Image (cartoon, rainbow, N blue to C red):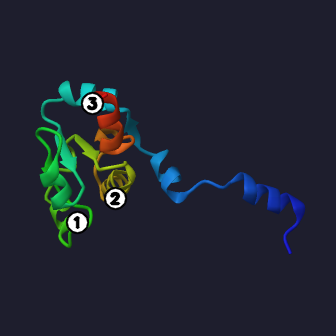
Amino acid sequence: MQNKDTQQENQACKISRWQLLKTQLNNLSPQDFKAQLAIQPNARLIDVRTVEEFEAAHLSGAINISYFAEDFWERIETLNTADTYFIYCRSGRRSVRVCTLMRNGGFDADKLFNLDGGLIEWETFFNS
C-alpha cells in the first residue's frame, strides 16, 4: 500500500509520455515554422505522414518519409545528421516521435524543428 505522499506525487506527475517527449524538442507554431523555414533555405522539410496523406496535400517543397513505412529508419539514416530539418505530420504526434528518434539517432537537436499541432494547426491559422 502506498503512503499518502507517494499517492499525491503520482497524481501530480500525470504527464503523458508524448507530452514529456515534446518538452525536449524545438516546437514551433505554424507562424514561426513558416518564418524559420523561409530564412533557412538549405533546410529540409519532411512530411512524415503516409504516402496517401502526402499525395492528398502537403506543404510546398516537402519530401515524404512515412513514419509507418517499413523502410522509415533506413531513409532517415540517409540524411545528413548536421543539416536542419523541419518535420511535420497531421496533428504533431508522429512528428514528435520522429524528431525524438532523429535526435536520439545522432541528428543535431538544435537543428530539428517540429510543427506544433501539425497540419491541423497550420490549416487553422493559414486557411482561416
Pick whichever of labels 1 and 3 is earlier in the sequence: 1
Tell which tag, 3 or 2, sits nearer the viewer. 3
Disc 2 target residue: 101
The disc, 3 or 2, on the residue closer to the chain's N-terminal end is 2
For label 1, count other residues whose C-alpha is less than 10 Å away and answer few (under 14), some (14-19) or many (20+). some
Residue depicted at 60% across the width and 54% down the height: 15
* Disc 1 to disc 2, C-alpha distance: 9 Å
Place of residue 83 in the rendered image (x, y in percent of width and height, measured from the top left): 19, 42
Cα distance between the residues tagged 3 and 2 = 31 Å
**How busy is the neighbourhood of tag 3: few (under 14 within 10 Å), some, or many (20 plus)?**
few
Q: Amino acid at mark 2?
A: Leu
Residue furthest to the front in view is: 128
**Quadrant where the image shows the C terminus:** top left
Circle 2 crowding by C-alpha within 10 Å: few under 14, some 14–19, many from 20:
some
- The tag on residue 127 is 3
Q: Nearer the viewer, residue 24 or 96?
A: 96
Q: Amino acid at mark 3?
A: Asn
